[in-house]
Image: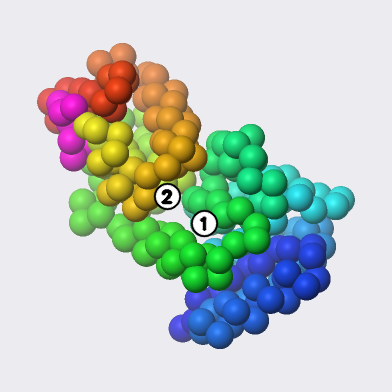
Amino acid sequence: MNTKILLVEDDADFGMILKQYLELEDFEVTWFQNPEDVVPVLNSDFPYHIGILDIMMPVMDGFSLAKLILKQKTSFPLLFLTAKNQKIDRLTGLKIGADDYLAKPCDPEELILRIRNILKRTAAITHETQMKVGDYMLDAEKLLLIHPNGNTRLTIREKDLLIYLLKHNKQLIKRDDILNDLWETNDYFTGRSLDVFISKLRKYLIYDSALKIASVRGIGFEVDFGVPK
């Protein structure tokens, strides 16, 4: 079965080039120039495996569309395209729940590589699907962090990072190791995205004061999730 891609790009020339290149790589692409046309599709079967959204679009920007998509399809993988290549765009997308971003004009081969990496992470479910995290229970398959005070739906990236931290419990973890192991790259923007995700995990784990993800200046993070119960 071919991977089905939702492509939302208002630029006719660029959208057509992307669509044709992706189809040459055996992806099945549905291209929307108007992001508002995607909204009715959200209430249908929504057969797509990944979405590629331009950020700067008239009427509705990519961030607004992403919020609507993730409200209906919580764990849907998203890759943002930005022509501006500005930090605010990237961090906003990551906070919304994006899996990756790429500046336009983008190298088609790099785009393909990032798509395949996202899909590989999406398909990879840990052998142990339920794990204790202090007073919480992580259901990796359902992307749920479960607690008596309420459940939190995680993105795939948040789930992967939490499992990574669990595997390195009571250890000092280097930032470079996390970035290379999970992001497969290490630059300024991936470093900032890691900080965003660490901050979000700390908020999610607030109901158990014994759980610690401490920043160690110049090195990385020291994790203490206690002794598994």
Task: Determine the residue positioned at 80% across, 71% down.
Answer: 12
Tell me the amino acid under the disc marked 2: Ile
* Name of the residue lying farthest toward the top: 209
Q: Is residue 216 above or below residue 24?
A: above
Q: Secondary structure at mark 2?
A: helix
* Name of the residue lying farthest toward the right: 59
- Residue 169 falls within the magenta-colored stretch: yes
**Mark-to-mark CA distance, 2 and 1:** 8 Å
Taking the image as shown, residue 106 lies to the left or right of residue 62, namely: left
State the image coordinates of residue 72 (x, y, percent, origin top left): 62, 52
State the image coordinates of residue 122 (x, y, percent, origin top left): 40, 59
**Callout 2: few (<14), some (14-19), or many (20+) C-alpha neighbours within 10 Å?**
many
Taking the image as shown, residue 111 lies to the left or right of residue 6, namely: left
Which of the marked residues, 2 or 1, is nearer the chain's N terminus? 1
Which numbered dot is residue 77? 1
State the image coordinates of residue 215 (x, y, percent, origin top left): 32, 20
Q: Identify the magenta region.
A: 166-172
Taking the image as shown, residue 40 lies to the left or right of residue 139, namely: right
Task: Determine the residue positioned at 80% across, 53% down.
Answer: 57
**Callout 1: few (<14), some (14-19), or many (20+) C-alpha neighbours within 10 Å?**
many
Residue closest to the eye, 61 or 69: 61
Is residue 139 among what the camera can see? no
Verify CB contact (< 8 Å) between mark 2 and mark 1. yes
Task: Determine the residue positioned at 22% across, 36% down.
Answer: 166
Task: Determine the residue positioned at 51% across, 82% down.
Answer: 25
Q: Is residue 135 above or below residue 2?
A: above
- Residue 165 falls within the magenta-colored stretch: no
Residue with the mark numbered 2: 156
Tell me the amino acid under the disc marked 1: Pro
Which numbered dot is residue 101? none
State the image coordinates of residue 205 (x, y, percent, origin top left): 37, 25
Q: Secondary structure at mark 1?
A: loop
